[in-house]
Image: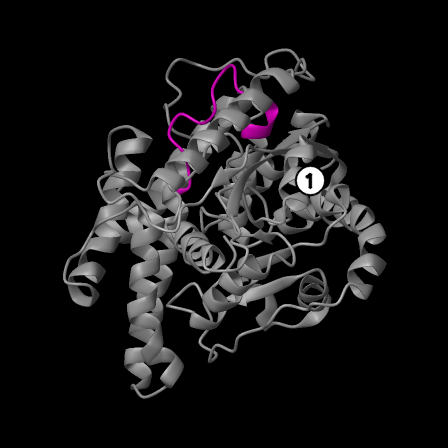
């Protein structure tokens, strides 16, 4: 997982409103996606739904799933298809190191958000974009990059808070205006030789563990053994010994062992929400003292270790249960290897060729007030249901699973754990 934590004081990066750079850079985005991310083709579907909302003059919020680091650039192809530039809310860490990516992101409409606290400047900017209806606004409602294209993480309520606040203001305009949310499904497909792509990475990890290459095993069995070994290493570090049981149960046990003492110290033992939300809550409590620099060096080191532990817990939680098996599409296998590689080295190699399909969902009208009688946020639930349905449809009908490059690719023992 990329390190998204910085001890630098946060400074809001506003959006760039001009269109000159956007128009100039758009033709180069396909080559950039192909070279640096392996995405060689992007297809946009149901764009007329977005065009209809644009024609109606609605304030438009686009809510895509967040699977890969290149998603902000891929979603830019939808902007091209709709013939309207977008604004995008992007984590501050993408801007703080400067360089070409930070420069390009801002010119393509991105602005920063500080995810470790309440960023009033980012929220105000997002609301004003929707009120003015100058351009559609892109917010990734999962809040984290999952690297699991067929699964959706819990959605954050900040997305609907921004939309409702803007809807209140638009309702007071003369004439009154509407705010709508379009869920957007991004589905990637790998078209290369899966075995040829992942075997070098698997063998590199095996060598790192001082193993000989286990070529006599099926691909899935090798992945299962690596998953068990990598988890055992962390169990030895945190629990003193490798644990027994399923990978799912062991990961949950390790996550709780890591997070609960930190939560007891910083947030009164509060454990509400999924692991990513819990980790974010802890970062928001721990980080300010580091940024201010008013604590001792020993305390700085202690807090840095706690932040690293929060990151580890979040990484563990992003391995979905039962994600790969004998009938899994190649993308799931590749995503699992990418997680291994990124967690071990902090980066991944470029796999190619990929294609991507972007499907625009039906417009969801946002009322100025939330229905307080509902147990959950109705708009957030509508976003989630549309995203799940579109991702399932794209996985089930648009893509057929190719035959393995070699016999036995998906053959594995029944002893392979259910969570890899």
Q: In which quarter of the image is the C terminus?
A: top left
Q: Find the magenta span and give its range.
A: 318-332
Give the vertical position of 387 relative to 79 (above or below).
above
Element at label 1:
helix
Q: Is the magenta stretch mostly helix, strand or loop?
A: loop
Give the vertical position of 146 relative to 215 (above or below).
below
Is 266 included in the stretch rendered in magenta?
no
Taking 321 as reference, is 213 left or right? right
Q: Position of residue 178 (x, y in %)?
A: 51, 48
Give the vertical position of 152 relative to 117 (above or below).
above
Q: Kindly tell me whether residue 367 is visible in this rendering.
A: yes
Q: Residue shown at 46%/50% (left/top)?
A: 144
Q: Where is residue 91 in the image (x, y as percent from the top left)?
A: 52, 61
Q: Residue shown at 55%/55% (left/top)?
A: 175
Mark 1 is surrounded, within 10 Å at the Cα level, by few (under 14), some (14 to 19) or many (20 or more) other residues, namely some
Question: 251 or 397: nearer the eye?
Answer: 397
Give the vertical position of 91 relative to 223 (above or below).
below
Please identify the quarter of the rendering in which residue 155 is found: top left
Please identify the quarter of the rendering in which residue 292 is found: bottom left
Q: Position of residue 54 (x, y in %)?
A: 66, 45
Is 331 included in the stretch rendered in magenta?
yes
Considering every residue shown, the one lying at the far front of the view is 174
Q: Position of residue 94 (x, y in %)?
A: 58, 64
Q: Kindly tell me whether residue 240 is visible in this rendering.
A: no
Question: 351 or 408: nearer the eye?
Answer: 351
Question: 84 or 100: nearer the eye?
Answer: 84
Which residue carries the number 1 mark?
Answer: 51
Taking 95 as reference, is 367 left or right? left
Q: Residue shown at 44%/46% (left/top)?
A: 142
């Amino acid at each position: 997982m990329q390190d998204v934590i910085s001890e630098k004081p946060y400074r809001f990066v506003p959006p760039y409103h001009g269109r000159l750079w956007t128009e100039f850079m758009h033709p180069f985005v396909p080559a950039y996606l192909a070279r640096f991310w392996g995405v060689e083709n992007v297809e946009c579907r149901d764009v007329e739904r977005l065009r209809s909302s644009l024609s109606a003059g609605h304030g438009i919020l686009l809510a895509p799933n967040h699977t890969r680091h290149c998603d902000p650039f891929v979603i830019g192809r939808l902007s091209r298809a709709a013939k309207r530039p977008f604004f995008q809310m992007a984590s501050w860490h993408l801007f703080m190191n400067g360089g070409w990516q930070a420069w390009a992101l801002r010119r393509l409409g991105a602005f920063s958000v500080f995810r470790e606290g309440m960023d009033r400047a980012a929220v105000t900017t997002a609301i004003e974009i929707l009120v003015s209806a100058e351009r559609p606004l892109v917010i990734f409602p999962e809040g984290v990059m999952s690297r699991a294209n067929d699964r959706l993480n819990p959605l954050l309520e900040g997305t609907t808070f921004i939309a409702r606040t803007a809807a209140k203001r638009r309702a007071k305009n003369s004439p009154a205006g509407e705010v709508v949310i379009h869920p957007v499904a991004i589905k990637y497909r790998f078209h290369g030789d899966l075995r040829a792509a992942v075997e070098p990475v698997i063998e590199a990890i095996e060598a790192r563990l001082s193993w000989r290459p286990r070529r006599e095993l099926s691909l899935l069995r090798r992945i299962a053994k690596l998953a068990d070994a990598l988890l055992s290493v962390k169990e030895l570090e945190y629990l003193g010994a490798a644990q027994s049981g399923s990978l799912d149960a062991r990961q949950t046990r390790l996550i709780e062992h890591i997070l609960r003492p930190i939560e007891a110290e910083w947030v009164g033992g509060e454990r509400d929400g999924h692991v990513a939300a819990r980790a974010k809550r802890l970062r928001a409590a721990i980080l300010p003292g580091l940024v201010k620099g008013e604590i001792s060096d020993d305390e700085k080191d202690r807090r840095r270790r706690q932040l690293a532990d929060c990151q580890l817990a979040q990484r563990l939680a992003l391995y979905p249960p039962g994600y790969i098996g004998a009938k899994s599409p190649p993308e799931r296998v590749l995503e699992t290897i990418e997680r291994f590689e990124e967690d071990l080295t902090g980066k991944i190699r470029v796999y190619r060729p990929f294609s991507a399909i972007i499907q625009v969902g039906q417009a969801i009208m946002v009322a100025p007030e939330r229905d307080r009688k509902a147990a959950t946020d109705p708009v957030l639930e509508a976003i989630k249901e549309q995203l799940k349905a579109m991702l399932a449809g794209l996985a089930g009908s648009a893509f057929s699973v190719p035959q393995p490059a070699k016999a036995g690719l998906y053959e594995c023992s029944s002893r392979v754990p259910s969570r890899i």
